[in-house]
Amino acid sequence: MFTPDNILTTTIDKAVRWSRTQSMWPVTFGLACCAIEMMAAGSAKYDLARYGMEVFRASPRQADLMIVAGRVSQKMAPVLRQVYDQMADPKWVIAMGACSSTGGMFNNYALVQGVDHIVPVDIYVPGCPPGPQSLMHGILTLHQKIMDGEINR
Amino acid sequence: MNTEVITISSEDYKETITNIKKDGFQMMVDLTAVDWFRKREPRFELVVQFLSVSKNLRKTVKVIINDENLSIPTITDLYPGANFYEREVFDMFGIEFENHPDMTRILMPDDWIGHPLRKNYGSGRIPVQFKNAPKVD
Amino acid sequence: MKSKKINRYNLKALKKKFEFWATNSEEGGWSISSTDEGSQKMLEVEDEKKVKIQTGTEIIDDFVVDEDSSDDERMIINMGPQHPSTHGVLRLQAELEGEIVRRVKPVIGYLHTGMEKTGEELNYFQGPTNTTRMDYLSPLFNELVFSLTTEKLIGIEVPDRAKAIRILMTELNRISSHLVALATGGMDIGALSMMIFGFREREHILNFFEKTTGLRMNHNYIRPGGVAADLPDGWQKDIEDIIQLIPEKLKDYDDMLLDNPIWKGRLQNVGILTTEECFAYGITGPSLRASGFDWDLRKSQPYSGIEKFNFDVPVLSEGDVFARWRIKVLEIFESLKIVEQVMYQMPKGPYKIQDKKITPPPRKRLDESMEALIHHFKIYTEGFKVPEGDAYVAIESPRGELGCYIVSDGTAKPYRMHVRGPSFCNLQGLPIIMTDSPIADAVAAIASLDPVIGDVDR
């Protein structure tokens, strides 16, 4: 396994960033239509396990990524913020779908017009609902963002 | 499929529903309200749909509600399934149901002010900001 | 109201069982004072109660049903709104006594989207865009009920081909919706392969939907006056594949679960819902049919020409979680029958009503005809006007009676649009089936009712 002939040199920055991307566990935060597509992305055909992400954690303490899948109502907003606060650092947020990104077609009294009013969002995935491919593209973009970004967050 | 529609006043409400239940309408399938703001007097109308599975019939009861106190007897003792519907109407229109077991808001948060589906309640639209558009506070 | 609750913690039966174990025979058995491991004498004076507890003739059980307990043994547990197995953002306040659920209160509204208010701002042409997002597992049913109500208000009939396409698409949607119900229900109880299986088969149907409507979910395909587009070329091939594939896979589910002792032990005699309770709480759909009452709106109050096709309505009599799971599998077979018949009997002709005031003209006519351009502009900016009146139309969605009540004041937008979601009503059955049963059965009970929170909160 570890032979003196093989030496791997890297910077600590790169190693940390790489390890952060390779097993990013999302917290289950399925709200509406997009949650079904998120589940579809996790199951047989699309298989998020390829990115080490199939473990949807029920507890926010064990999760790194929150995929806000669906519309966030005024009643749900405090819950969402609390779940986000309970997640351990470093943490990332993907706003999946038009509703959680901007409020979508429901511009009315009941919905928070974009989840970025409550939590900082890293990636917005458009679509109503975005297909599993779009979600995966969003996730890979987030990986790229982490690889290019700062280690301190 | 023809539905029988009857319109009654809120005083006859409970009695009519009792008779409907006796007539063999086993299910209350829907209960909602319509706000005729500035179109009709009195303003609110309750629309209740009944279904008889044995006779394969439907019946619609429209109840005109007095404007003064905005309250009407509950029918949860006859049809327990009316519970959620009456709470929804209370939440969305502000019509109170007397003797209801749990007359609280069901969809909106408890501290919400106003009743959203009334016609004089705005939809709460936030204007979309385009480039160079004047800022709206 | 009859109660068919099964007392799973019958103290007397347990006592009898343990007495038999302790004495080992009808004629006294061994004596308590000595054991057969040599001459080990027990103490002369022993507390009789202690001995009984040690030998198992008396059982100290915290979860005794027929004894009253003080209030301080009860505690309130909050399930949700962020919980992996509550099918969305349902929140339950459960009052527990030990492990037994004594009272449950579902707290809903965490997904309230104000769709009924939004529906008053969109015209009838845009309406299905809004309603399709209510019950996101069966979007086509929502579009269908809105379109049928609008058509009833205007007083028009859509062409035969449009009707047949509507039946084809909605029955396929029923299959995909039931597959998700089976998948998530299996996942909640611990059969994780079921989750993978259900979503795998659903993909085949969604692929067909994507080919036809352009979207996997939230299609906005069925519109007032017909459907948005004709079926794609070669659709028969796709349907044939689906008809061939799904029964094979359903056999896999049966092999895995039907005779599985764990699955049966978790589901049988759990969460019983009687027909009387269903009537009282307005519960319809598979839950009512699983309790032994034959009621299907497709048979009794047919819509969109479904009476032309032969199919059976599966009815089971147990009314427990197992029956509610089984009936969904059986209904998939019946839906496949309908889909097959529609495929062979698909009529030719237009897929939209030929009425210039309601149907927008085809795109290529806009280049040739001024009149077509005017109609196009009028329909897409103002919409069409609907005569004054109100109508309530109900159809059989995968979860029960889905109704739509529209009040029109003669303009192009509904004055009031209300949707009677089946999940909203069915959720009221949750306290009945969860009370006086262990907390472990709670998740099975929720999964069996199959509530879609988008439909509950709207």
Image (cartoon, coloured by chain):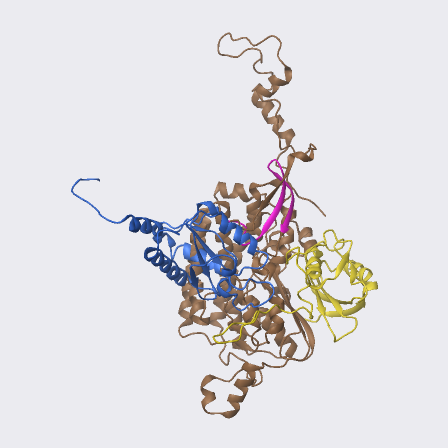
Q: Which range of residues does the magenta coloring cover?
A: C84-106
The chain whose colour is blue is A
Magenta stretch encompasses residue C96: yes
Residue B117, placed above or below residue C60: below
> Can residue C297 be spotted in the picture?
yes
Residue A46 in the image, given as x and y percentages of width and height: 38, 58
Residue at horizontal 65 percent and vertical 34 percent from the top: C73
Q: Nearer the viewer, residue C296 or C77?
A: C77
Residue C288, placed above or below residue C128: above
Q: Is residue B61 left or right of residue C411?
A: right
> Can residue C337 be spotted in the picture?
no
Residue C354 in the image, given as x and y percentages of width and height: 55, 84
Q: Is residue B45 left or right of residue A135?
A: right
Q: Nearer the viewer, residue B130 or A67?
A: B130
Q: Nearer the viewer, residue C226 or C304?
A: C226
Residue C311 in the image, given as x and y percentages of width and height: 55, 63
Dominant secondary structure, magenta: strand
Q: Colour of chain C?
A: brown
The chain whose colour is yellow is B
Residue at horizontal 64 percent and vertical 18 percent from the top: C49
Residue C95, placed above or below residue A30: above
Residue C118 in the image, given as x and y percentages of width and height: 60, 69
Residue at horizontal 39 percent and vertical 62 percent from the top: A133
